Image: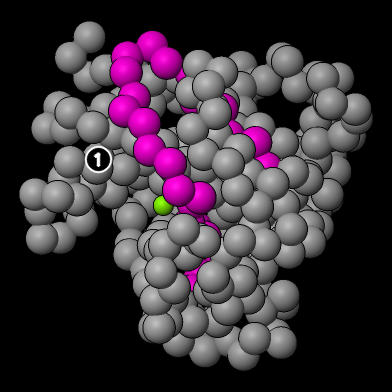
Amino acid sequence: MRIARFTVDNDLHFGIVEGEEGAETLRVIAGDPFYSGIEPTGATYPLEQVRLLSPMIPRSKVIGTIANWAGTEAPASPQFFIKPNTTVIGPGDPVTLPEYSESVSPEGELAVIIGRIAKSVPLERVHEVIFGYTIANDLTARDMLETDVQWTRAKCFDGSTPLGPWIETELDTDSLNITTWVDGDTVQEGNTADMHYSVAELVSAASEIFTLLPGDVLLTGSAPGATVLRDGQEIEIEIEGIGSLITRVRDEAN
Ligand code: MG
């Protein structure tokens, strides 16, 4: 099942995405699916008539993962960092480049959405705490990775985690192609089979450090490949089995 969060005439809804690609409709559900289950209200809208938002705003955190793909040396254990929930934007929102950086790059990543309170989850029970999956762009000010000791400026600026277009609740994540394009040019290309640590291993390891809450998001890392984003460019990230997250860059100075 695919679940989207969207507005129609400024009213906020969650809905089930149905229909063929290019002709999808949204069946409105009552309340917030993270807390009140899936209850259709009877209302439906064509996808083209709504504004898609980030499928959720994480209640407490976005967890990022580094060095998790073939092409980098595998770390001895999963390596995480934290992005505040103010980094999250949706498919229709502009990507704003921070003034302090000359080198912001997109990172197309599979995002895991946590569905329940979870602490110290063993590998075999990770599936019980996952609500679903979406597409993330872990935007990174790469020049700040070079100059700064901490990664706050590099990873945590406003809008640095576009998410969407919706949550897919049923997905086998063992072998999914992930491709990132900027204005139609391929900048990253990989398959989740190339990840050093699997989704289950990442969620289990993160839950050893801190409690995961419903709506928390764990990013699983990106394939190698960097490009410098410029004003007006379109970023498209496609993940097999989910769809495409498309956003556009707007320079803060303009
Ligand atoms: Mg990343």
Label 1 within 8 A of ligand 1 by Cβ: no
* Residue 239 in view, yes or no: yes
The prevailing secondary structure element of the residues shown in magenta is: loop
Residue that label 1 marks: 141
In magenta stretch: residue 45: no
Query: Mark 1 packing: few (<14 Cα in 10 Å), some, or many (20+)?
Result: many
* Residue 157 in view, yes or no: no
Q: x, y percentage for residue 172?
A: 79, 61
In magenta stretch: residue 233: yes
Left or right, 103 with respect to 55, comes to: left
Residue drawn at the location 44% of the way across and 73% of the way down: 74
Residue drawn at the location 61% of the way across and 38% of the way down: 179
Magenta stretch? 211-239
Left or right, 181 with respect to 78, comes to: right
The secondary element bearing badge 1 is classed as strand
Q: x, y percentage for residue 53?
A: 56, 33
Q: Amino acid at mark 1?
A: Ala
Position of residue 35 relative to residue 51, above or below, is below
Q: Could you tell me which quadrant the C terminus lies in?
A: top left
Asked whether 104 or 163 is in front, the reply is: 104
Residue drawn at the location 66% of the way across and 68% of the way down: 130
Q: Residue 142 occupies which quadrant of the picture?
A: top left
Residue drawn at the location 57% of the way across and 64% of the way down: 195
Colour option used: one colour
Left or right, 149 with respect to 209, comes to: left
Q: x, y percentage for residue 180?
A: 55, 34
Q: x, y percentage for residue 245?
A: 59, 32
Position of residue 108 relative to residue 175, above or below, is above
